[in-house]
Image (cartoon, grey):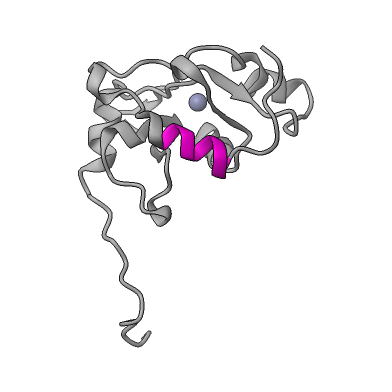
Amino acid sequence: MYGDDTSVTRRRRDPEFRGAVLTAYQYRCALCDLDLRIGNITIGLEAAHIKWHQASGPDVVENGIALCCLHHKLFDIGAFTLGDDRRVLVSEKAHGSQRFDEILLRHHGEQLNAPVRKEHHPAQPFVDWHREQVFKGCARPL
Ligand SMILES: [Zn+2]
């Protein structure tokens, strides 16, 4: 058993966040359109925080994007970020083989799929935070 950790106040994650984000993006990766299901169970699709939960990013849909697990990882590690109009910007520091081109680089400059409702679009302060705090290096030229 771990002792009570009274020195740290952890914010609880809103259990509704994942469902709200996935619904907003119609249960598809906003980058690659992955919508894999087994029966009615969605596989490999996640609600990514733009401004991280541990950095006090709120559990609201405009701070979320539906991403497949691979694109979620690449987003959280700063291999890509969002520019104006939800345009995907891939870092100059991210590179790899032909598979890298297929998985990420081909999306450079593309617009991320929009959520159904305009008010659910990624909010600029969260996008700015991601670009400044998470994104690695400079974006490749468009
Ligand atoms: Zn994806």
- Residue at the image position 35 percent from the left and 35 percent from the top: 64
State the quadrant of the N terminus: bottom left
Q: Is residue 26 left or right of residue 102?
A: left
Magenta segment includes 30:
no
Count of numbered circles in the view: 0
Q: Quadrant of residue 60?
A: top left
Give above or below for 69 relative to 105: below
Question: Residue 28: horizontal and vertical position, in percent?
Answer: 37, 22
User: In the rendered structure, does residue 128 fall within the stretch colored magenta?
Assistant: yes
**Span of residues in magenta:** 126-134
The front one of 2 and 77 is 77
Residue drawn at (64%, 14%) of the image: 106
Q: Quadrant of the C terminus?
A: top right
Please name whichever residue, 141 or 61, is drawn nearer the observer in this view of the structure.
Answer: 141
Any part of residue 66 in sight:
yes
Q: Residue at x 59, y 43 (%)?
A: 77
At which x and y percent is residue 58?
A: 30, 46
Asked if residue 49 is positioned above or below residue 33 in the image, the reply reads: below
Residues 5 and 23: in front is 5
Estimate the x, y position of residue 52 in percent, counting from the top left.
43, 48
Q: Is residue 37 left or right of residue 77?
A: left
Asked if 101 appears above or below 68 in the picture, the reply is: above
The reply to whether residue 69 is visible in this rendering is no
Residue found farthest to the right: 97
Q: Mostly what secondary structure, the magenta segment?
A: helix
- Left or right: 40 with respect to 34? left
Residue 11 occupies which quadrant of the picture? bottom left
Q: Is residue 120 left or right of residue 54?
A: left
Residue under the image location 35 percent in, 16 percent down: 114
Please say if 24 is above or below 109.
below
Q: Position of residue 96 (x, y in %)?
A: 77, 29
